[in-house]
Amino acid sequence: MSAPPNAASSSTAGPNPTAGPNPTAGPNPTASRPLLPGPPSLANSVRARRTGAVPGLRYRPATPADPAKVEEVDRRLEAWARGLDLFPSAWNGDFAGFQFGRAVVLQHPGALDLERLTVAGELLLAENLVDNCYCEEDEGKGGSHRGLGGPILLAQSAIDPHHGTPESEEQWRLGMQADGPLRSYHWAMKDYAEFATPSQTGRFVHDIARLHLGYLAEAAWAETRYRPKVWEYLVMRQFNNFRPCLSIVDAVDGYELPEVVYARPEIQRITALACNATTIVNDLYSFTRELASDPTHLNLPQVVAANERCGLRAAYLESVEIHNRIMASFEEESALLSATSPLVERYARGLSDWVAGNHEWHATNTHRYHLPNYW
């Protein structure tokens, strides 16, 4: 992997090595936002919790994670994060609780080697760092909906380099070391480009831009207190979702789905369906966690409850059904496409493996997720 020069001391390039460059951050607007329809006390309504898989959820069992691989990937990721001074020691519990190593080992059972698994972990860690430090107000790490466009634009440039005068390029290079989120994107992308093809790196850059567009839409709705319709929310989540993680399944497994194949509409459709299904899984498993920190946080059950004027339990169960229908479409259409080409079959299997592994990670990560007592 590429070795960043003087990475451990690079935090001196900016005033804040961990929080996003968001000088316009203001008071948390959620404090005055009206509650969506639902039980009178959302926090009390989800106090009783359970663990394990969501009852009735459609999912495929994941390949078990090799504990030795998990331990080694975690060791490498922690060394990488410390070398880049990505976050203060107070956040070490968040790092351990997230279980980055276990996540990527579950998501990429066909990975070619530990190096590629580690880089998948670097990209996952970087994406979460940008989200937490720039976007999520309730994480307490500097994120803000207000003025998010500027920091997100700079974050995009960390993987989509600036080209200009020698002076502006040098200033950009220095700027990319200004804080943890920018450093994490910048160096993770360098490591990814060491084994990915130019087409695969270009695909990832494009899908990170999709993700950032989703972040901006969600922030705009929060700032204006807009209540999206269910279809509008699902459109937003097709952008603000796990697609960058699934963009790399072929590179991590050691092959390339050629651009001419990847760009076909039917391949784009199964990719989007896989990403959308696994993102709704995140909505379902993070539901109680989000309600505890922000009762107005947008997720699919909240949006269904607001639009259909029903309680959160009914909305949650309807959200499970929405997921199941999307998941069924992914499985059925992937099977048909897989029969047409061994290469497409390998790619579709990689998508399915990622979706299955990500579900297993959500269902078993009791540090982060618990289910509401709706059954």
Image (cartoon, rainbow, N blue to C red):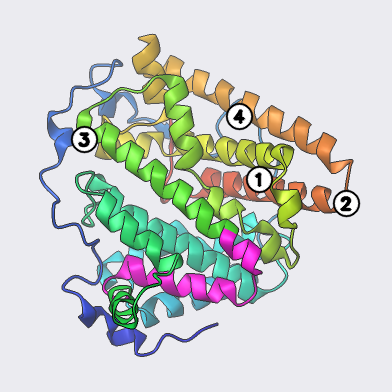
Query: For mark 3, what is the residue?
Result: 223
Q: Residues within 10 Å of mark 2 (few under 14, many from 20)?
A: few
| Residue underneath mark 1 | 356
Residue 118: horizontal and vertical position, in percent?
A: 57, 71
Residue positioned 62% across, 76% down in the render: 115
Name which residue type carries label 4. Leu
Q: CA distance from mark 2 to mark 1?
A: 21 Å
- Name the secondary structure under disc 2: helix
According to the image, label 4 marks what residue?
57
| In the rendered image, the vertical position of residue 327 relative to residue 22, given as above or below | above
Residue 103 visible, this orientation: no
User: Is residue 186 rendered magenta in the image?
Assistant: yes
Residue segment shown in magenta: 177-202
Quadrant into which the N terminus falls: bottom right
Residue nearest the viewer, comparing 205 with 221: 205
Badge 3: residue crowd in 10 Å (few <14, some 14–19, many ≥20): some
First along the sequence among labels 1 and 4: 4
Q: Nearer the viewer, residue 273 or 44?
A: 273
Work out how far the residue at label 4 is from the one at label 3, CA to CA, in angstroms. 32 Å
Amino acid type of the residue that numbered disc 2 sits on in the rendered structure: Pro
Image side of residue 335 versus residue 192, left or right: right
CB contact under 8 Å: marks 2 and 1? no
What is the spatial separation of the Cα atoms under label 1 and label 3, in whole angstroms?
Answer: 34 Å
Residue at mark 2: 342
Of labels 4 and 3, earlier in sequence is 4
Q: Is 327 situated left or right of 177 in this image?
A: right
